Image: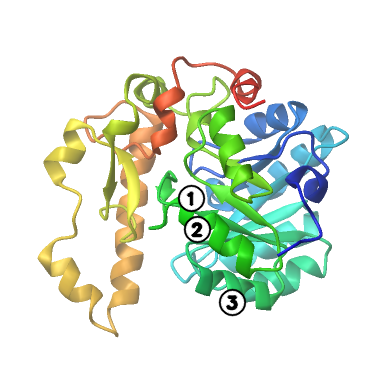
Amino acid sequence: METKYQNLTDLLQIQHPIIMAPMFLVSNVKMAIVGMESGVAACIPALNYRNTDLLKEAILALKAAKPKGGAFGFNLIVNKSNIKYHEQLEVICEYGADFIITSLGSPEETIKMAKSKGIKVFCDVVNLDFAKKVESLGCDAVIAVNNLAGGHRGNLSPEVLIPQLVENCNIPVISAGGVGNKAELDKMMQLGAIGVSVGSPFIAASEADISEEYKQACVQYGEKDIVVTEKISGTPCTVINTDYVQKIGTKQTWFETILNKNKKLKKWVKMLRFMIGTSAVTKAATKATYKTVWVAGPSIEYTKRIESVKEIVKRFV
């Protein structure tokens, strides 16, 4: 179906149809500013900030440095595992952003509040049912998270998911997953997406405040080294298959599986797993440790060196 916007550049008033995807612990203000200066939109997870004062500081810094034609946004985890969600949403709506990306839950409250402030809302979806649901709630675009995405991924290939959403939705479709160079970006656009959300290629950015070991892993490892684990948040998540990941395995224990089937307990089990997994990822991303749980997607295949965000953007344009 024909939508109002035929390209992400029109929707966000940017130069290239790319969102630098929100990555837990990796994305930061420095990366976002260089990204905007390079002609792409930038998104940071609100959970990268320990408290709302730091989130406010980030918004003010982004607004002050935002170039003409720049766009920035924040990612919100909108399910009950994120106890900071409501205050994060209030701060973003009060201080302003160009867009919000919602993940892992119902975006209804976010859509109502953000759109009343003129902030666009894009919703992560993995299938048509959820896409139609968030469209009915009034979001501005869906982000089609396919089975090549880094972090929390979908189950459908881009070749299946994108055309399915394009044909059945009246809002734009942005693709997430499987884009490591210009040829892959062009492929997603040919399938009907108006733009792409790209994350893993930016992990090895010189502006990222993560360990050199994490960045070097994205250079050293490739597509064949990415595996899916249930050990981080309870939801399937892609990581680099390090020796430590192989040692602990990628499946939930039998006990966790039983608890997750209990209607009264599963919410708390998932919250606990999220906290434990997040702690492990934080330690691995910020310092050298033998407990290496590095989140990344198969598009690190094209990461051959540590370089600036500006140079990484050139790979796609």
Front position among marks 2 and 3: 2
Residue 162 in percent (x, y) is at: 55, 55
Dot label at residue 9: none
**Disc 1 element:** helix
**Residue under the point 28% across and 70% down:** 269
Disc with the residue nearer the chain's start (2 vs 3):
3
* Residue 283 horizontal side relative to residue 102, left or right: left
CB within 8 Å, label 2 to label 1: yes
**Taking 264 as reference, is 109 above or below it?**
above
Q: CA distance from mark 2 to mark 3?
A: 16 Å
Q: Quadrant of residue 284?
A: top left
Residue 120 in percent (x, y) is at: 75, 59
Residue tagged 1: 158
Closer to the camera in the image, 218 or 179: 179
Dot label at residue 133: 3
Amino acid at pointer 1: Pro
- Crowding at dot 2, Cα within 10 Å, few <14 / some 14-19 / many 20+, comes out as many
